[in-house]
Image (spheres, grey):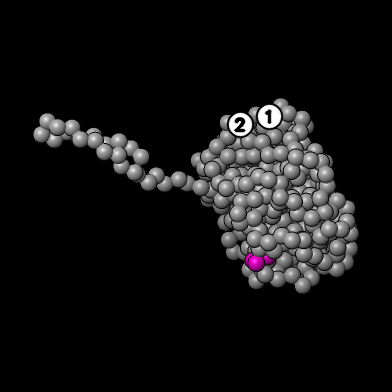
Amino acid sequence: MIAVTTVYGGRQASCRVTVAVATTEVPPAISSGYWHTVALRSDGTVWTWGSNLYGQMGDDSRERHTPTQVNGLNGVTAIAAGEQNTVALKSDGTVWAWGNNDWGQLGDGTTSFRRTLVQVSGLTETTAISVGTGHAVALKSDGTVWAWGRNDTGQLGDGTTTTRLTPIQVSGLIGVTAISAGALHTVALKADGTVWVWGWNSHGILGEGTTMNRHAPVQVSDLAAVTAISAGQTHTVALKSDGTVWTWGGNFSGQLGDGTMTLRTVPTPVSGLTGVSAISAGWQHTVALRSDGTVLAWGDNHWGQLGDDTTTAHLTPVRVSGLTGVTAISAGGWYFTVALRHDGTVWAWGNNVFGLLGDGTTTNRLTPHDIGFKLR
């Protein structure tokens, strides 16, 4: 409502006019790290909960059991939680980070951990971000990928094993549309539907048929028409355009979902799974969102992270109990899972040490639990 005053013929007249002002909302998002979770609200603010040992909450607390807003941060369009650090992408294409920085994973040119935001050096026109154990990657609008931090297994993809304190371009990689950082490896999806990988390759986590580390990108064997990727601790997951899910790498707890505990060095289809729209790989479990809004999970379940009201591991997908209308999922590193529903509510289950689930307790949950926090 604004006031309008006019003068005509020496007389003054006033009225009030209602003007519609457009507000820009961003899609709400969730990202589960190893010991904390970060959430993006539709107003562009960022909220965190869980362990704060290295300042990954963005403040000087020890831990948070309920969502707490990160001060001084707005206009955010994407978020990513790592092992002990957090990264945010702003609408102006700049990237900001806080938390542990032992390997330079904050990208500010130092190895000093930060409890408040620092800008990643020299990075602009960014469209996507992802964080691993000690490294981070960013996708730019021109389709190039940039990485920084830990590089002992070649996870930065620059052809070396040299740690980088500021972003460096991944060698020879263009036309990329999505990125995902695992613990010690990195995955990229190109516009042509092919998948490219580099870094640590124990257990065949790179999916190119060997167990040899790669210091520069190589293509995943016999995999095409991919629409989404997710890199976990010891395994990797890809979603194809036909709604099927393919996995490779370590399979100690059945996280590949093929009915076995056999590691795979090339992509293998998940048993009986179709109609999938999103995927997320955790430490040793995997989660899939179907187009009907239901969630399935498989792999390790010691802490109830599969959400089926048991602690029994499953080698093939099982339905997460009582959860519908889901729009986003995130498999946490330390045996927990988080989901976002269409109404903006956040649901979590599994391990709740440090308040990982954000429900105000440290009680483990074997089924999804509404944490009482909305992202819109």
Q: Amino acid at mark 2?
A: Asn
Residue placed most toward the observer, 263 or 22? 22
Residue placed most toward the observer, 286 or 156? 286
Q: Residue at x 77, y 36 (%)?
A: 51
Q: Write the start and end of the magenta stretch as one range.
A: 288-292
Q: Quadrant of residue 317?
A: bottom right
Q: Amino acid at mark 1?
A: Asp
Reply above or below: 73 against 267: above
Q: Quadrant of residue 356?
A: top right
Sequence-first disc among 2 and 1: 1
Query: Which quadrant holds the N terminus?
Result: top left
Residue 198 visible in rendering: no
Residue placed most toward the observer, 192 or 106? 106
Q: Residue at x 51, y 47 (%)?
A: 25
Outermost left residue: 9
Q: Residue at x 69, y 63 (%)?
A: 294
| Distance (Cα) linking label 2 and label 1 | 8 Å
Determine whether the residue tagged by mark 1 lies in a helix, strand or loop.
Answer: loop
Numbered mark located on residue 335 in the image: none
Please report contact status of discs 2 and 1: CB closer than 8 Å, yes or no. yes
Residue underneath mark 2:
71
Secondary structure that dominates the magenta span: strand
Q: Quadrant of residue 48?
A: top right
Numbered mark located on residue 59 in the image: 1
